C-alpha cells in the first residue's frame, strides 16, 4: 500500500478501564463515527501515527511520479502523452493534498520532505521498481493504482477529518488512473505479437510487487489492530490483497495475459482465488533500501528539492520586498 | 535545512459553476497572494471546478475553539421552533 | 508560393512550436522547485499538447495526404520540423525555462490575438481557444520573471544570464520569409515584423520592473522555421518518436 507497516508506538490495545477520561471520550467519538478535527484533543500516539501514515502516503505519491514520469517524453501518441502527463500531475496534486492534511497535525511540509530526503521516512516499496517498457505504464495504472484504490476508497471514511477529505478528493480524481492503464494495456494485448509480449512481460514483472504493496499479513500486528481501532486503517492487509487478486485475475484473462503464478486457482469452497507464496525477503530488502531503484529515486528527489531552493528563496524575497514597498507607500 | 523559510500556507475557497457560495477546497503553499491564486487555479480547478477563487493566509484565519463546542453550538439544539417541521399544518391546506 | 503549400508550412510552424515547447515543459514534471509548480508547469504543457493536436491535424487536412497530428509529430525527421529555435533550447535551470517561456508567451499571445482575425475560420477558431490558455501562460511567466529578477542576488544573476543567453533566438520570431509573405497576402495571419514593437514593449516593461536589462537588438540565430535546427532537436525527437520508430505501424 502507499503506507506500509505504519508503527503506532503502542505495545498493546488499551481497555476502556486503562484509558484516561479524555482517551475514553476520544475513542467513543471515533466509535460513533464522529470525525476528529485538527485542533481537538487527540492521543499523542494517534497524532504521531497519522503523521507517519499520511506523510508516507504523500511521499509515495511524489516518488511515484518518477517511474511514470520516465515515459512522459516517450509516450507513443500525443493523446497518450497528454493522459500520462495529466496522471503524473494528479499524483503531484495528491501528494500536495496529503502533505496539507499532515500539516494540520502540527508538522511542516519542509520537515516531512527533509525526513524523506534524508532517508528516515519510508514510501511504498512498489516505486523502487523500474519502468522498462511502455507496457509498464499500463501495468502501473492497472495494477498499482488498482491496488491503491482498494485501500483508498475505505480510507475516505477514516476518523481524521482532513485525511478523510483528502482521500475523497483523491479517489474522485483517481477514478481515471486505473482505467487509462487498463486501456493502454488492452491496446497492447490486441496489438502486434511484440506488443503482446511487451504486455505479458510487464505483468510478469509487476504482479508480485503489486501483491507486496499490501504489506505482510498483519493479522497478529498490534499496530494494525490499534490503527483499526482508531479507524485510520479500515481493512486488514490480507483482506485487501485477496480482494485485489479476485478482482484482477479475470481482468488479466480478458486481456489474454497469464498471471505469473503457477499456484493461482479458483477455490470454489472459499469463493476466492488461492495464490502462491509471496517472496517477503524481496519485500524487506526493497523496504530496507535495496530495491532496483531506491538510490536513484531518492537522489532525483533530493536534487529537485535542492536545485529548487534558490527559486523558493527568490519568491520569498520578492514577497517581502513587495510587502515592504506596499507598507512604505501606505505610510 | 530547518532554518530555511517555507512558503506560507494558504487556504483556498472556490465558487463552483452553480452559483453557490465559495467553499473551502483545500490548502497550498505560495510565496504571496498573486501566486497563491495562480497556484489555486492550477491545483484546484484542473477539472473545471470553479469560476472564482479566494485565498486566505492560513495564519490569518480566526477559528472557534473546539473546547467551546458545547457552549457555542449545543444551545441551538433546543430551539426546535426555528424549524418548519415543528409546526403541524392541516393537510387539507396543502403545501405551505 | 502557392496558398495551400504555404498554409501547410505555416500550420506546421504553429503546431511544432507547441509540440516542442510542450515536450520541454513536460520534462519538468516531478523535478520542479515545488509541488505547486509541478502542477502549474504541467498545465501549461498540457495546453500546448492540446494546441499541437489542433494545429497539426489541420495541417494534415490541408496537406490532404492522409497524415494526422500523430503521423506528423512522430514520423518526420528533424529537417522537416518547423519550430523556432527558441522552443527547442534545453530547460537549463528554472530561470532559463522561465525566460524561454516568457519570451515565447509574449510573442505567442500577440500572434494568436492576430490569428483570431484570420480569414480562415478554422485558424481563427483554434487561435481563439489557444489565446485564452496563452493569456494565462503569459501571466504566469511574467510573474516568475518578476520574482526571479527582483528576488535574491542569486536569482537576479541567474535570470539576467538566462535573459541574455536566449536573446539571440528571439529575432527569428519576427523574421518573415516566403511562407509568411503568402500568409500575409491571403489574410491568413499577420506580418511577423508587425509584432516586434508590441513584443519589445511588453518584454521591456516586465524586464524593467524585474530590474533586468534587455540586451541590445543584434545578431539573430535563425533557421528553425525552415528546418535548420540546433543539435538539441534530434535528441528531443529520439525520445518523442522512439516507440513509433521501433514498432512501425503498431497501434497504441
Image (cartoon, rainbow, N blue to C red):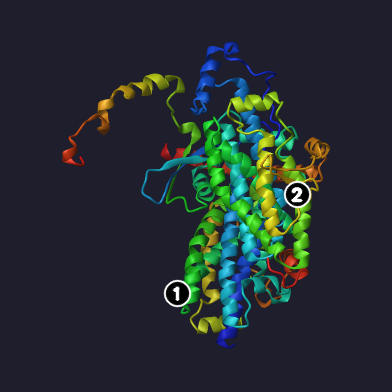
State the residue in front, C249 or C62: C249
Which dot, 1 or 2, sits closer to the camera? 2
Give residue C98's quadrant in the image: bottom right
The part of the image, by quadrant, that contains residue A215 is: top right
Q: Position of residue A225 (x, y in %)?
A: 65, 25
* Label number found at residue C117: 1
Residue drawn at x 58%, y 74% as measured from the top left: C57
Q: Is residue C164 above or below residue A169?
A: below
Query: As displayed, is residue B91 above or below residue C221?
Result: above
Q: Chain of mark 1?
A: C
Disc 2 marks which residue?
A206
Q: Percent x, y for residue C248?
A: 75, 72
Residue B60 vertical position relative to residue A175 in the rendered view, above or below = above
- Answer yes or no: is residue A308 visible: no
Chain that bears disc 2: A
Left or right? Give the position of B76 relative to C36.
left
Left or right placement of residue C96 versus residue A119 in this view: left
Which of the image's four quarters has the N terminus of chain A? top right
Residue C188: x %, y % from top left: 50, 79
Instruction: Give the CA separation, mark 1 to mark 2.
Output: 52 Å
Asked whether the viewer can see residue A5, the reply is yes
Question: For the point 53% across and 43% down, which residue is it?
Answer: A169
The residue that appears at 54% across and 60% down in the rendered structure is C204
Q: Residues within 10 Å of mark 2 (few under 14, many from 20)?
A: many
Q: Residue A14: where, in percent of width, then height?
A: 62, 16
Residue C93 or residue C198, whichever sits in front: C93
Q: Secondary structure at mark 1?
A: loop
Amino acid at each position: 500500500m502507499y503506507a506500509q507497516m505504519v508503527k503506532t508506538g503502542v505495545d498493546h490495545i488499551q481497555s476502556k478501564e486503562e484509558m484516561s477520561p479524555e482517551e475514553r471520550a476520544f475513542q467513543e467519538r471515533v466509535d460513533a463515527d464522529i470525525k476528529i478535527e485538527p485542533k481537538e484533543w487527540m492521543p499523542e500516539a494517534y497524532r504521531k501515527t497519522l503523521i507517519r501514515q499520511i506523510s508516507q502516503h504523500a511521499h509515495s505519491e511524489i516518488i511515484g511520479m518518477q517511474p511514470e514520469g520516465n515515459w512522459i517524453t516517450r509516450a507513443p501518441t500525443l493523446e497518450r502523452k497528454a493522459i500520462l502527463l495529466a496522471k503524473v500531475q494528479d499524483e503531484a496534486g495528491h501528494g500536495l493534498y496529503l502533505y496539507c492534511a499532515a500539516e494540520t497535525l502540527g508538522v511542516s511540509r519542509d520537515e516531512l520532505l527533509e525526513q524523506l530526503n534524508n532517508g528516515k521516512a519510508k514510501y511504498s516499496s512498489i516505486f523502487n521498481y523500474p519502468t522498462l517498457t511502455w507496457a509498464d505504464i499500463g501495468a502501473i495504472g492497472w495494477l498499482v493504482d488498482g491496488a491503491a484504490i482498494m485501500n483508498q476508497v475505505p480510507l475516505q471514511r477514516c476518523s481524521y477529518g482532513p485525511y478523510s477529505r483528502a482521500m475523497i478528493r483523491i479517489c474522485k480524481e483517481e477514478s481515471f488512473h486505473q482505467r487509462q492503464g487498463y486501456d493502454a494495456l488492452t491496446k497492447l494485448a490486441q496489438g502486434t505479437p511484440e506488443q503482446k509480449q511487451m504486455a505479458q512481460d510487464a505483468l510478469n514483472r509487476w504482479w508480485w510487487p503489486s501483491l507486496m504493496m499490501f504489506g505482510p499479513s498483519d493479522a497478529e500486528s498490534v499496530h494494525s489492530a490499534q490503527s483499526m481501532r482508531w479507524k485510520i486503517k479500515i481493512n486488514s492487509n490480507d483482506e485487501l490483497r485477496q480482494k485485489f487478486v479476485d478482482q484482477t485475475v479475470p481482468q488479466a484473462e480478458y486481456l489474454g495475459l497469464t498471471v505469473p503464478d503457477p499456484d493461482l486457482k479458483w477455490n470454489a469452497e472459499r469463493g476466492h482465488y488461492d495464490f502462491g507464496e509471496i517472496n517477503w525477503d524481496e519485500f524487506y530488502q526493497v523496504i530496507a533500501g535495496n530495491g532496483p531503484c531506491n538510490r536513484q529515486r531518492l537522489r532525483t528527489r533530493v536534487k529537485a528539492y535542492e536545485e529548487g531552493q534558490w527559486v523558493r528563496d527568490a519568491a520569498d524575497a520578492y514577497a517581502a520586498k513587495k510587502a515592504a514597498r506596499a507598507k512604505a507607500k501606505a505610510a | 535545512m530547518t532554518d530555511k523559510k517555507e512558503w506560507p500556507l494558504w487556504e483556498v475557497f472556490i465558487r463552483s459553476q452553480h452559483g453557490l457560495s465559495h467553499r473551502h477546497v483545500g490548502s497550498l503553499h505560495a510565496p504571496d497572494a498573486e501566486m497563491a491564486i495562480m497556484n489555486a487555479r492550477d491545483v484546484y480547478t484542473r477539472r473545471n471546478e470553479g469560476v472564482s477563487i479566494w485565498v486566505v493566509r492560513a495564519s490569518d484565519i480566526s477559528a472557534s475553539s473546539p473546547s467551546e463546542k458545547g457552549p457555542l453550538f449545543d444551545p441551538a439544539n433546543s430551539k426546535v421552533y426555528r424549524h418548519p417541521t415543528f409546526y403541524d399544518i392541516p393537510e387539507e391546506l396543502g403545501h405551505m | 508560393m502557392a496558398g495551400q503549400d504555404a498554409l501547410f508550412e505555416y500550420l506546421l510552424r504553429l503546431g511544432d512550436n507547441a509540440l516542442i515547447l510542450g515536450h520541454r515543459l513536460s520534462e519538468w514534471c516531478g523535478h520542479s522547485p515545488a509541488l505547486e509548480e509541478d502542477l502549474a508547469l504541467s498545465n501549461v504543457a498540457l495546453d500546448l499538447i492540446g494546441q499541437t493536436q489542433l494545429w497539426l491535424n489541420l495541417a494534415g487536412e490541408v496537406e490532404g495526404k492522409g497524415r494526422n497530428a500523430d503521423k506528423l509529430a512522430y514520423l518526420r525527421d528533424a529537417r522537416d520540423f518547423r519550430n523556432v529555435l527558441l522552443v527547442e533550447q534545453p530547460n537549463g535551470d528554472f530561470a532559463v525555462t522561465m525566460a524561454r517561456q516568457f519570451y515565447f508567451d509574449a510573442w505567442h499571445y500577440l500572434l494568436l490575438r492576430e490569428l483570431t482575425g484570420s480569414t480562415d475560420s478554422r485558424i481563427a477558431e483554434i487561435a481563439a481557444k489557444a489565446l485564452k490558455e496563452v493569456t494565462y501562460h503569459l501571466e504566469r511567466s511574467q510573474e516568475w520573471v518578476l520574482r526571479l529578477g527582483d528576488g535574491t542576488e542569486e536569482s537576479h544573476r541567474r535570470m539576467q544570464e538566462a535573459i541574455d543567453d536566449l536573446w539571440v533566438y528571439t529575432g527569428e520570431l519576427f523574421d518573415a520569409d516566403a511562407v509568411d509573405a503568402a500568409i500575409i497576402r491571403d489574410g491568413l495571419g499577420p506580418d511577423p515584423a508587425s509584432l516586434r514593437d508590441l513584443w519589445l514593449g511588453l518584454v521591456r516593461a516586465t524586464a524593467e520592473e524585474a530590474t533586468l536589462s534587455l540586451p541590445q537588438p543584434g545578431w539573430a540565430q535563425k533557421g528553425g522555421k525552415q528546418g535548420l535546427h540546433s543539435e538539441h532537436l534530434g535528441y528531443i525527437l529520439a525520445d518523442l518518436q522512439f516507440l513509433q520508430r521501433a514498432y512501425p505501424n503498431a497501434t497504441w
